[in-house]
C-alpha cells in the first residue's frame, strides 16, 4: 500500500520535471562598476550596472561570466529551472528511499512467516 502511494507521488513529481536544455547552475550577481577617470556617469557617482554569473567548481575555483543586459531574464529563467530540477530530484530520492524501506519491511515479514 505504502509502495503504491509512494510510487504515484514519485511519478507525479517526475511528470513535472523541466525536461529542457534550459538549465544553468550558478548565481547571478548584479554589480555597479566605476571607471577611474574620463567617465561623466562615474564622476556623478552613478557607475555602470553589470551582471555576472558566478559558478563554483569546488576546491575554491569559481568562474565568473559577464552577462549582457539582454540575457539577464533568460539566465534567471535557466537558473530557476535548475533549482526546480534539483529540488524535484531530491524529493524523488526521498520517495525512493521510502520504497526501499517498505520493500525491506515486506521482505522481513515474509522471512518471519517462513521461519
Image (cartoon, rainbow, N blue to C red):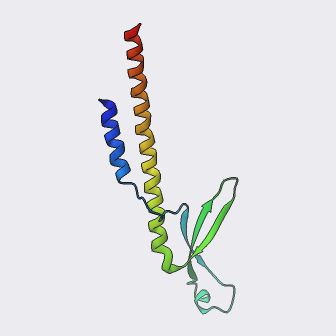
**What residue lies at 70% left-to-right and 53% top-to-bottom?**
59
Quadrant in the rendering for residue 9: top left
Q: Quadrant of the N terminus?
A: top left
Q: Residue furthest front?
A: 114
Locate residue 113, reporting x and y percent.
Answer: 37, 10
Which residue is at 35% across, 45% downward? 11
Residue 21, percent from left and from top: 48, 64
Q: Which residue is drawn at 49% across and 74% down?
A: 72
Instruction: Pinpoint residue 71: horizontal percent, then vertical percent.
Output: 50, 76
The C terminus sits in image quarter: top left
Nearest the camera: 21 or 92?
A: 21
Residue drawn 46% across the image and 56% down it: 83
Relative placement, left or right, of 9 versus 36 is left
Which residue is at the front of the view, 102 or 76? 102
Image quadrant assignment for residue 91: top left
Q: In this view, does 114 lie to the left or right of 47?
A: left
Amino acid at each position: 500500500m505504502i509502495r503504491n502511494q509512494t510510487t504515484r507521488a514519485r511519478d507525479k513529481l517526475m511528470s513535472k520535471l523541466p525536461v529542457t536544455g534550459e538549465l544553468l547552475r550558478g548565481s547571478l550577481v548584479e554589480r555597479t562598476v566605476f571607471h577611474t577617470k574620463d567617465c561623466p556617469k562615474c564622476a556623478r557617482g552613478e557607475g555602470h550596472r553589470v551582471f555576472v554569473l558566478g559558478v563554483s567548481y569546488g576546491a575554491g575555483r569559481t568562474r565568473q561570466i559577464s552577462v549582457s543586459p539582454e540575457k539577464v531574464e533568460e539566465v534567471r529563467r535557466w537558473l530557476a529551472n535548475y533549482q526546480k530540477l534539483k529540488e524535484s530530484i531530491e524529493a524523488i530520492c526521498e520517495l525512493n528511499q521510502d520504497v526501499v524501506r517498505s520493500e525491506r519491511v515486506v521482505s522481513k515479514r515474509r522471512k518471519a512467516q517462513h521461519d
